[in-house]
Image (tube, rainbow, N blue to C red):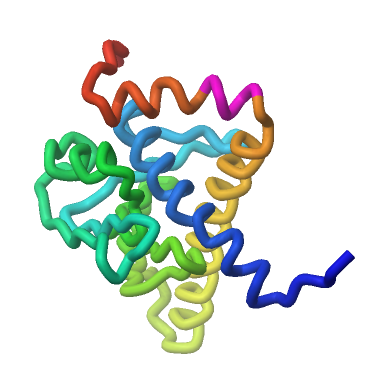
Amino acid sequence: MVEMSQADKIRRTTFLGREFLTWLMFRSSRDEGVFSLDNGEVIEVFFERALTLDGENPAREMSALKVDDPTQSEEVLLSLRLGKKVSRARLQLIKDGREFAFVLDAAGLGLRSVKLPETQALDPVEAMAEKAGLCTELEDAVHELFVRFMRLRLDVDAWSTEAAPIARWIDGTSQEVH
């Protein structure tokens, strides 16, 4: 068997980040942003105005959109119908009443332009430690969501059950009541 390089492995799995963000957008729309984590915690995830979608050839098939509610935007849903997937999104994550704002890039699940909740510490060293803890908390929440997606994605039956309502949402034929 031929050994695959790390770069080849990354290239072959980059679609998963785009599928993750697209799934996250669907679930955020369907469940009004509420996600119950495996540890019993509840977080909320909302898509904000800025969103990038791309197809198999991002250099030719990229759409950068700014819309009020991306999860309900006809322009976003049309891009999804055309086979594009979410490749970058500005998100708001709320956990324990604290709001985090950030951009999530599908290519490497990198967090960018992170805005953390206000810190309570007055001492600069303590404030820095608190900010580092908040960064870890945000990374852990995104990681937990990605792990949930991957468990679902790798289970053929569960994924086929999930894919049908995603397709109806994209097509605009979803009849689900919240």
Residue furthest bottom in the image: 124
Residue furthest front in the image: 1
Indicate the position of residue 157 as horizontal and vertical percent values.
Answer: 65, 22
Give the left or right position of residue 3, taking residue 113 as reference: right
| Image vertical order of residue 37 relative to residue 178, above or below | below
The residue shown at (36%, 67%) is: 116
- How many marks the image carries: the answer is 0
The residue shown at (65%, 72%) is: 8
Quadrant position of the C terminus in the picture: top left
- Tell me, yes or no, if residue 134 can be seen here: no
Indicate the position of residue 86 as horizontal and vertical percent values.
Answer: 34, 52
Examine the structure image and report whether residue 91 is included in the region drawn in magenta: no
Quadrant position of the N terminus in the picture: bottom right
- 137 or 54: nearer the viewer: 54
Give the left or right position of residue 106, taking residue 91 as reference: right
Examine the structure image and report whether residue 160 is included in the region drawn in magenta: yes
- 146 or 12: nearer the viewer: 12
Give the left or right position of residue 62, taking residue 3 as reference: left
- Tell me, yes or no, if residue 37 can be seen here: yes
- 130 or 29: nearer the viewer: 29
Indicate the position of residue 75 as horizontal and vertical percent values.
Answer: 13, 43
User: Which secondary structure is most common in the magenta stretch?
Assistant: helix
Residue furthest right in the image: 1
The residue shown at (57%, 38%) is: 37
Give the left or right position of residue 130, taking residue 174 as reference: right
Q: Quadrant of residue 90?
A: bottom left
| Image vertical order of residue 111 relative to residue 28, above or below | below
| Image vertical order of residue 73 relative to residue 129, above or below | above
The residue range painted magenta reads: 157-161
The residue shown at (45%, 74%) is: 131
